[in-house]
């Protein structure tokens, strides 16, 4: 017998994961495209996005679905995004696991906890503090307390549920930054985050005359010099591949070649 997922409240906590824990976002352009698609697919199916958080290899959502259209919205969202991502990356096969996970939320407390946990995911895995992470709806909800409905509508989530549940910005912040047992949250290391590393890499490349996005199009000698400068500055081959779109084998070859030259120069001195 097919399981019926409809809840009394219509709220769900949804998670979609990359197959084999693979990355589902290679850069910020991918994240923006996913968010735009999410808004489009959910609106057309009558599903409301309450909260969202994009991580490296998975996505958390809190959705309101009163017409039993969530499966259709999620299927279209994940399939369309995967097709576009695969085309850009020149890859084939599944990007997401075959079935997204979902959990029904049957009380106000469960909805509040789901919103808190979605926003807290980056902090709990040691990526970023909740309030510093740019790829979640935390900032959207915070702004909703101070802006009008027209401004709020331009976001990717509907803040009305959050406004009703938490009542005030102070209440929303206090609940969001708490831990389930009521103690003060253990803040993660203030280590450099992924997007900060990307931004610093782009700044370094620009200081050498070429933005990261254009590095594939410049002459090889100039490209190679910047790639080695990035590696010399502490960026791994995988990071350089991810930030520039240049293949891992090419980046490795450039790094090895420049390292040999550098070693010979140092020996001659």
Image (cartoon, rainbow, N blue to C red):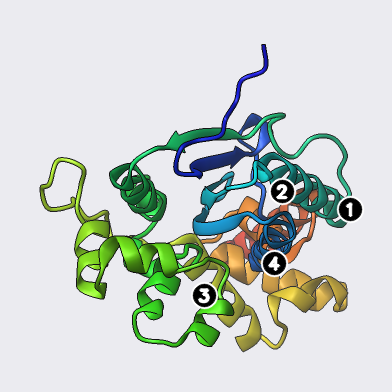
- The crowd level at tag 4 (other Cα within 10 Å; few <14, some 14-19, many 20+) is few
Please say if the residues under marks 4 and 3 sit with CB atoms less than 8 Å apart.
Answer: no
Residue at screen point 82% across, 75% down: 221
- The crowd level at tag 1 (other Cα within 10 Å; few <14, some 14-19, many 20+) is few
Q: Mark 4 or mark 1, which is nearer the start of the sequence?
A: 4
Horizontal relation, residue 193 to residue 64: left or right: left
Q: Mark 1 or mark 3, which is nearer the start of the sequence?
A: 1
Secondary structure under tag 2 reads helix
Indicate which label's residue lies in the foreground, 2 or 4: 2
Q: Label 1 to label 4, Cα distance in Å?
A: 18 Å
Q: Mark 4 or mark 2, which is nearer the start of the sequence?
A: 4
Q: Residue furthest top?
A: 1
Q: Label 2 to label 3, Cα distance in Å?
A: 36 Å
Residue at screen point 21% across, 42% down: 180
Measured as percent of width and height from the top left, residue 174 is found at 19, 63
* Residue receiving disc 3: 200
Residue at screen point 70% across, 75% down: 212
Quarter of the picture containing the N terminus is: top right
* Residue receiving disc 4: 36
Secondary structure under tag 4 reads helix
Q: Is residue 22 above or below residue 205?
A: above
Residue at screen point 58% across, 54% down: 236
* Residue receiving disc 2: 73
Measured as percent of width and height from the top left, residue 26 is found at 68, 56
Q: Label 2 to label 4, Cα distance in Å?
A: 13 Å
* Residue receiving disc 1: 87
Please say if the residues under marks 2 and 1 sit with CB atoms less than 8 Å apart.
Answer: no
Residue 262 appears in view: yes
Q: Is residue 202 above or below residue 46?
A: below
Secondary structure under tag 1 reads helix
Horizontal relation, residue 212 to residue 16: left or right: right
């Amino acid at each position: 017998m097919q399981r019926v997922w409809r809840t009394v409240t219509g709220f769900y906590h949804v998670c979609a994961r990359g197959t084999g824990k693979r990355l589902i976002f290679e850069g910020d352009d991918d994240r923006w495209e996913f968010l735009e698609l999410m808004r489009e697919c959910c609106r057309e199916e009558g599903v409301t996005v309450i909260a969202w958080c994009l991580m490296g290899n998975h996505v958390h959502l809190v959705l309101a679905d009163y017409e039993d259209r969530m499966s259709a919205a999620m299927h279209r969202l994940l399939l369309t995004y995967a097709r576009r991502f695969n085309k850009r990356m020149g890859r084939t096969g599944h990007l997401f696991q075959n079935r997204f996970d979902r959990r029904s939320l049957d009380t106000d407390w469960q909805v509040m906890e789901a919103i808190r946990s979605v926003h807290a995911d980056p902090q709990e895995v040691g990526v970023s503090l909740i309030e510093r992470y740019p790829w979640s709806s935390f900032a959207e909800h915070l702004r909703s307390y101070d802006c009008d409905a027209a401004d709020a509508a331009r976001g990717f989530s509907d803040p009305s549920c959050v406004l009703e549940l938490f009542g005030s910005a102070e209440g929303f912040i206090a609940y969001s930054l708490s831990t389930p047992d009521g103690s003060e949250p253990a803040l993660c290391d203030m280590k450099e985050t992924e997007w900060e590393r990307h931004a610093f890499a782009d700044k370094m490349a620009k200081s050498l005359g070429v933005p990261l996005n254009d590095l594939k199009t410049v002459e090889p000698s100039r490209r190679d010099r910047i790639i080695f400068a990035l590696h010399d500055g502490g960026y791994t081959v995988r990071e350089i591949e991810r930030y520039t779109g240049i293949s891992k084998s090419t980046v490795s070859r450039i790094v090895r070649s420049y390292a040999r030259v550098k070693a010979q120069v140092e020996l001659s001195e």
